[in-house]
Amino acid sequence: MNSRTSHFRTADIPGFSSVAMLVFAALYAPIIVLVIYSFNASPSVAEWSGFTLDWYVKAAQNDQVVNATINSLIVATSAAVIATAVATLAALGTTRRARYRGITAIYAAINQPLMVPEVVTAVALLVVTAALKKATGYTGLGYLILAHAAFCIPFAYLPIRARLEGMDLSLETAAADLYASDWQVFRHVTLPLLAPGMLAGGMLAFVTSFDDVVITEFIKSPGQDTLPTYMLGQLRRAMTPDVNAISTALMAVTIVLLFLFFLITRKKS
Amino acid sequence: MSQSYGISVRGVVKAFGQGPSAVRALDDVSVEIGGGEFFTLLGPSGCGKTTLLRLIAGFEMPTMGEIFLDGADISALPPSKRPVNTVFQSYALFPHLTVAENIGFGLKMQGKPRAEVAETVARMLALIQLEPMAARRVNQLSGGQQQRVALARALAPQPKVLLLDEPLSALDAKLRKEMQSELKRLQQETGITFVFVTHDQEEALTMSDRIAVMSAGHIEQIGTPREVYTKPVNRFVASFIGETNFLGGEWGTGGVKLSNGAMIAVDGKGSGAVTLAIRPEQVRLCASADAGAMPATVTELVYFGTDTHCHLALAGGARVTARLQSQASGDVAIGVGDHVHIRASAAQVLAD
């Protein structure tokens, strides 16, 4: 029998796997270099002169880095909580009722931050926050938190909606049949079954917020650097390996979070 | 045995959709279900049997008509306010709860004291013989065990009526037989009114006190299993329940005259063309001199173990199936191509 089948098989294309390997190399080689150079004893980013943990120590002792990390954590955590709460309501509103006219427009509206260029959102938010800062005199982290919450909503919304759509509606019917009021149905059946989706959505929102540069750069007040904007600022002066160290640490945290996200979403099936 | 409650469905219409595209899933259905009865809604898919069940449960609201439970109108009550529980076709067990928590869910929602919930759950676990599984998650159970948990969960709050929506359809044949007698036993022990939905005529015949045969949003016939089997009112009921031979004929004196000239004695009288329903087991081989004997030719013999299905061609071309019980000798003494005589020991005139 001929080994070739009528299916489209990528294995049959000459050089397919070589190209795939090249793409992976392009994706991951720079990251590997970054990680290696974060342990480089030389202050130059271009030459290797031995192993050290100094850059991690230096970064951890730098007040600016510590402050930026605290800002990042406050903003990302608050934004993730707000975005998850709003996204949960949005997901319930778009799945727990009969399909209605204009639902596609509502999906598009909810997911708008995914499609509109981020810099446009940033400029728009800058205009509003500038006016608000002038009017209220408040210049705290609140603006950053609200702005991040807004653009993180679609990241939280998508996994929550997927979870809701995959939910067996007869479970809620059964709860109502067993004397549960509407609120009890939500509290004892819908919410516990939705929890993994909300956790996954919250984590995606957290990572997205933690990573943001563009919007933060536009609307932060002076001295309100988050970790990514601090690193960007460092780059403008002189590239030092402590940025490599911070990046590596950031990546480690992200990998752990994404791994947890994977575990949670996989469990649902 | 607790007190039993009946259900009265009066002139219920359920339409889905609106305007000219609306579909009437139920069209003016009325039925009285007695307290403590094992009542079955039987029909093919799409006949409205599940819709009727969902209306009684309160998952759907009737477009017209009323539903009474124990004399009180419950038509407008939400499901959580009806003393009626459902065993779902998919079981709909809560995957995030343990077996015990599933069974106790209804009582907990009713705000029953914790001790009472625990006591009832223990009693229910004993009833379904799943005590060792109390702390397990429901997805760790087999299909048959899940089925029993679903049953216990619905029975725990001591509903006045238990609704069962094709609860056995997901089980394999052997387990289904076991659950059939288990259900029957539970119904007799608890004395609760059971309303059972199925498309399986054998299940309906073996388990029910009474059966409502449904088709296209109507109830075609209500009766005991014996009544709907032996005295089907129309062609639909006759063909849906069991196998039936349909023979056309005309009213004559003392019976119906078939097109081949044979007279078949039936109760009642009338005039014009009629259809007779004759069950295969009512077709007997006989001697040519017997009253009502008809000549026939054996066209096919199919052996079923307990009996043999004998396909026959009558003079005039009509086809008839006879079910001949296997004798001690194990063999039917006829072969394909034989010319025999048959007669009908009973026949039912159909209203059509």
Image: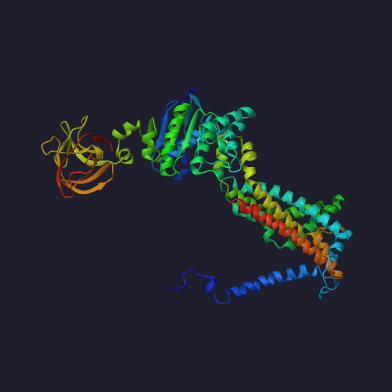
* Residue B278 in view of the camera: no
Q: Position of residue A47 (x, y in %)?
A: 82, 76
Relative to B110, A127 lies left or right: right
Most foreground residue, B316 or B328 = B328
- Front-most of A235 and B30? A235
Above-or-below relation of B212 to B311: above
Image quarter in which the N terminus of chain A is found: bottom left
Residue at position x 81%, y 55% in the image: A129
Query: Residue A163 vs residue B218: left or right?
Result: right
Residue B238 point in image, percent of width and height: 30, 38
Q: Can the viewer see residue A26 in this picture?
A: yes
Q: Which residue is the extreme one toward the front?
A: B329
* Quarter assignment of residue B350: top left
Q: Nearer the viewer, residue A247 or B270?
A: A247
Q: How far across and how far down the image is residue A137, in percent?
A: 87, 51
Q: Position of residue A229 (x, y in %)?
A: 81, 62
With A89 as the anchor, is B228 left or right in this view?
left
A97 above or below A17? above
Number of marks present in the image shown: 0
Picture residue at 13% right of the left edge, 38% below the top: B287
Q: Residue furthest bottom?
A: A14
| Figure check: B124 above or below A108 | above
Q: Is residue A143 above or below residue A187?
A: below
Kindly identify the residue that appears in the image at 51 percent across and 40 percent down. B145
The color scheme shown is rainbow
